Image (cartoon, grey):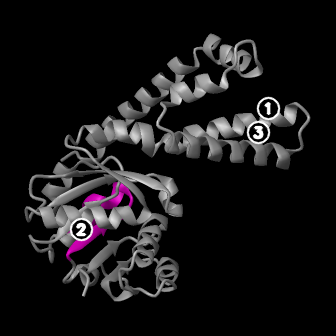
């Protein structure tokens, strides 16, 4: 029998985790989800897993408890869980911006805590998630957390929780940066005379192909970019425009601002 996994919250990310776990061979009987919203519970029940409207019922006997609620309500949720929580249960938080120290304070039982920063492609099994474990997480719990988050994509462990702010800025917010570029390229294609659907297909398939190429190649992205940029050619002229506009500096500033905001949210959500 697999370890019981309780999902507290039944939104999109929790549903993706449940679906990923089922695809990876975790039996439906080992997963339970709790949510006060009947429609969310119905959506989860359609996967074949148990659903309840009580968080306390969901976590009873669970080896791992995935906290999949909004950061603004996490304190209240964990505070309620503390009434029935057991010290040996692992808490896995996917709530953005909430430090593990705050969760530890709210839970009051010295639990092992793994804080995660997944990104939205996890909804399609193509995410990348950074994980940080506090010093109470056992090797077995670390492996359990890894297996849960690996069900929706690639995982990376970080040793310093402060790195989560950088992770948030690079990969957590990162999909939006690529969507922004796609949006601009589609609009530029339409302005050049392509119909909207053609411009969209060309842009999205090019983005996908470039990502596959960067993942499969041993060359760095900078080298791959140079390989495409023939002297005096079309790509060189396009890149020169980006360089004149200090595109790299803008991206650097954008990522830094995202990291700064992540730090601010951690202070806000983790306050006493």
Q: Horizontal placement of 224 versus 235: left or right?
A: left
Q: Residues within 10 Å of mark 1 (few under 14, many from 20)?
A: few
Judging by the rendered image, the residue that carries numbered circle 1 is 188
Q: Quadrant of residue 149?
A: bottom left
Judging by the rendered image, the residue that carries numbered circle 2 is 144
Circle number at residue 64: none
Task: Give the spatial CA distance, label 3 vs label 1.
Answer: 5 Å
Task: Give the spatial CA distance, label 3 vs label 2.
Answer: 42 Å
Is disc 1 placed on a helix, strand or loop? helix
Query: Which residue shows up at 46% across the image and 55% down it?
Result: 127
Is disc 3 placed on a helix, strand or loop? helix
Instruction: Report if residue 78 is visible in the image.
Output: no
Residue 147 colored in magenta in the image: no
Q: Are marks 3 and 1 in contact (CB under 8 Å)?
A: yes
**Vertical relation: 4 (above or below) 229:** below
- Span of residues in magenta: 63-79
Query: Which residue shows up at 22% across the image and 79% down it?
Result: 62
Comparing labels 1 and 2, the label whose residue is closer to the camera? 2
Q: Quadrant of residue 242?
A: top right
Task: Give the spatial CA distance, label 1 vs label 2.
Answer: 46 Å
Percent coordinates x, y for residue 186 in the rendering: 76, 39
Judging by the rendered image, the residue that carries numbered circle 3 is 186
């Amino acid at each position: 029998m697999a370890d019981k996994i309780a999902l507290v919250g039944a939104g999109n990310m929790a549903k993706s985790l449940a679906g990923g776990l089922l695809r990876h061979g975790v039996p439906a009987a080992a997963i339970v989800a709790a949510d006060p919203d009947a429609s969310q519970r119905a959506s989860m029940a359609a996967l074949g897993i148990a659903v309840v409207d009580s968080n306390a019922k969901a976590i009873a006997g669970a080896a791992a408890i995935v906290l999949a609620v909004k950061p603004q309500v996490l304190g209240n949720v964990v505070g309620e869980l503390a009434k029935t929580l057991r010290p040996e249960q692992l808490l896995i938080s996917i709530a953005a911006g909430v430090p593990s120290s705050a969760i530890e304070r709210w839970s009051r039982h010295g639990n092992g805590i793994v804080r995660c920063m997944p990104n939205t492609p996890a909804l399609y099994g193509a995410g990348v998630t950074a994980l940080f474990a506090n010093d109470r997480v056992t090797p077995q719990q670390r492996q359990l957390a890894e297996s849960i988050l690996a069900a929706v994509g690639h995982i990376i462990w970080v040793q310093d929780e402060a790195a989560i702010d950088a992770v948030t800025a690079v990969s957590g917010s990162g999909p939006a940066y690529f969507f922004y570029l796609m949006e601009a390229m589609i609009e530029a294609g339409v302005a050049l005379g392509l119909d909207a659907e053609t411009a969209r297909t060309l842009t999205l398939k090019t983005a996908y192909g470039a990502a596959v190429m960067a993942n499969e190649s041993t060359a760095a992205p900078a080298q791959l970019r140079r390989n495409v940029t023939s002297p005096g050619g079309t790509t060189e002229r396009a890149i020169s425009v980006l360089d004149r506009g200090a595109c790299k500096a803008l991206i650097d500033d954008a990522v830094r601002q995202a990291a700064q905001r992540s730090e601010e949210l951690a202070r806000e959500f983790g306050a006493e």
